[in-house]
Amino acid sequence: MRKVTASANPAPSVPVVPTAPAAPVPVVLAGARGHGRWHLANVRRLQHQGRVRLAGICELEPLSAGELAASGFGADEPPEQSDDFGALLDVTGARAAIICTPIQTHTELALTAAARGVHLLLEKPPAAGWADYARMAEGVARAGIACQVGFQSFGSHALPAIRELMSTGAIGTVTGFGAAGAWARDDAYFRRAPWAGRRRIGTTDVVDGVLTNPLAHAVATALELACRGRSEEVVSIETELFRAHAIEADDTSSVRVTTAGGPRVTVAVTLCAERPGEPYVIVHGEKGRITFWYKQDRVLVQRAGRGPEETVHGRTDLLENLLDHLEHGTPLLVPPASTGAFMRVVEAVRNAPEPAPLPDGAWETRYGGPDGGPDGGARRVVPGIDSLVAAGAESLSLFSELGASWARVGEAATS
């Protein structure tokens, strides 16, 4: 054993100069009600950590003192409020902005921020159609700003774990990707805003359907695993769009995407479930499968010759990732390019024939919550849809191919 003896004349110590913490990033939130309340709470969390400062809120009607207090913001330093997004960015000196406004406003607001050099967290879907998406992506790239799209599931640490399993052949050759989502929404959900459940307002595209908004994560997450979400990997898209509710957009749909890499991606989703459950993505392989419940960050691996293995993973918050990108150069988790394949699906839905209304006998009205409790109003349910959605993800089939009486074979639109 070698014995080390301290030097009699140690080198003088170098004083450690503490690094000054970065100043909080001034942030403006556009759209602070509805889902925006979640962002408001997240900003409050990060403000407590000293990473951000809520500099402004853009709303058509300013938040009241009571609404601010309910979100944890006191009256001692209230944020600026305005219905003019550009002017609010100017007066607050915002460095970053969160856009959580109606789908059809995303592109113009993103470009307004880009013109001022303001970095973005842009809620999904990033735009209502391909042309607006391309215009937005080009604008933010030209401005040199960071733009993070709000697909929270891309922050799950389960995604790299699943990619590792795929790349090492844990389930053999991948043969396809399926996604399923069975949710329930009552009639009031479609009355929450003038754009809810609309395909367009006048000549302005909205495309607020089940595939493109409520269960957009199912589509985007499956495409992220299949082709890293790249638009150039999409070869063709088949859509089957239906609606049970008295709306313009689809509430019960299936889509199949053929990618250049080979395996297809099939998604089956509904807002008319009998008993709603957690949405998930399945990676099918020749020797097994991987199921990913993306809202729970939970992964189940089933493969030949081994027992099932279940793991729960952590998650990186997308706003924190944006801040890390600005401060340390950490790669963005959801740059616009990673949502290109999803936007191809949005464009296919936008250009597809109007969603077919389900015949009266295919749906029924129920009252109360989906679990049978008293909460919730009238909602339309499609009997048997829960099993059809699961079968779509399992067999990689469209509703028409599963024998649904209301989905005739040959009705799929292909783009």
Image (spheres, grey):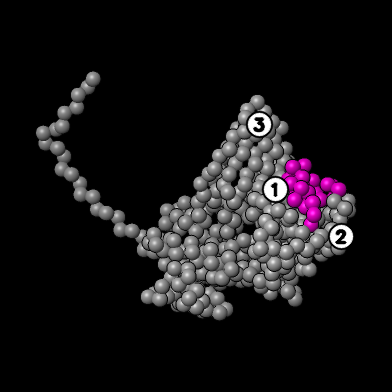
Residue, far top: 1
- Say left or right for 122 vs 379: left
Identify the residue at horizontal 37%, vertical 75% (top origin). Answer: 76
Q: Amino acid at mark 1?
A: Ala
Specify which label sits upstream in the sequence, 3 or 2: 3
* Secondary element type, mark 2: helix
Give x and y (percent) for residue 78: 42, 75
Whether residue 399 appears in magenta in the rendering, the answer is: yes
* Secondary element type, mark 1: strand
Image disc number at residue 193? none
Q: Amino acid at mark 2?
A: Gly
Identify the residue at horizontal 15%, vertical 43% (top origin). Answer: 12
Q: Nearer the viewer, mark 3 or mark 2?
A: 2
Residue, far left: 8
Q: Separation of disc 3 and disc 2 at Cα?
A: 41 Å
Give x and y (percent) for residue 230: 65, 51
Q: Quadrant of residue 104?
A: bottom right
Give x and y (percent) for residue 304: 67, 28
Q: Which residue is mark 1?
A: 179
Decide: few, some or many residues near mark 2? Use Cα within 10 Å; few <14, some 14-19, many ≥20.
few
Q: Which residue is mark 3?
A: 303
Q: Quadrant of residue 207?
A: bottom right
Identify the residue at horizontal 54%, vertical 43% (top origin). Answer: 312
Image disc number at residue 361? 2
Quarter of the picture holding the C terminus: bottom right
Identify the residue at horizontal 20%, vertical 46% (top origin). Answer: 14
